[in-house]
Amino acid sequence: MTGYPSSSGSPIFIIFFLAVVAFLIVSYWKVYTKAGEPGWGALVPFYNLYLYCKIAGRPGWWWVLLMVPLVNIVVGIIVAIDFARAFGKSTGFGVGLWILSPVFVPILAFGPAKYTKPMPTRG
């Protein structure tokens, strides 16, 4: 059978993919460090979501809501907006963070954004 070769198995694709993943890990590590949290927390499943909620000023247990289908959409938007605001960014930036985090997280990580601890919320 002839056709186009599969690009998903090519060494160039794999190297590119690994480079993007490494860049995102470094970006999240740096953002968590800016917020005064352990950078290595970005690598630990579930704990990274706990830290994400905590940085956003939401209760740590909200990470559980991010696991519930459909609820996670609403909670994800709320937490992303609060996360952006914690770094002095706008609501629009927060929506961008939710929709296209591989672009917006590095902006937070390597840009001049400073973390300002949000007021605790109820919940």
Image (spheres, grey):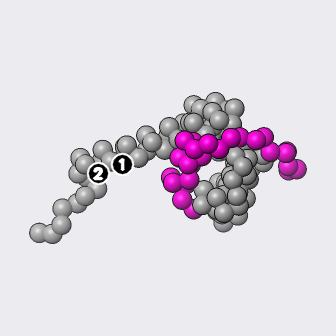
Where's the N terminus, which quadrant?
bottom left
Image height of 26 relative to 83, above or below:
above
Q: Which residue is drawn at 29% across and 51% down?
A: 13
Is residue 80 visible from the viewing direction of this image?
Answer: yes
Q: Would you identify the image quadrant in which residue 2 lies?
A: bottom left
Residue corresponding to mark 2:
13
Q: Would you identify the image quadrant in which residue 60 lies?
A: top right
Near-viewer residue (105 or 64)? 105
Q: Would you identify the image quadrant in which residue 51 lies?
A: top right
Is residue 79 visible from the viewing direction of this image?
Answer: no
Inspect the magenta stretch and tell me whether residue 120 lies in it: yes
Amino acid type at mark 2 = Phe
**Residue 24 in the image, given as x and y percentages of width and height:** 49, 44
Residue 108 - label: none
Residue corresponding to mark 1:
17
The boundaries of the magenta stretch are 99-123
What is the spatial separation of the Cα atoms under label 2 and label 1, in whole angstroms?
6 Å
**Residue 68 in the image, given as x and y percentages of width and height:** 67, 58
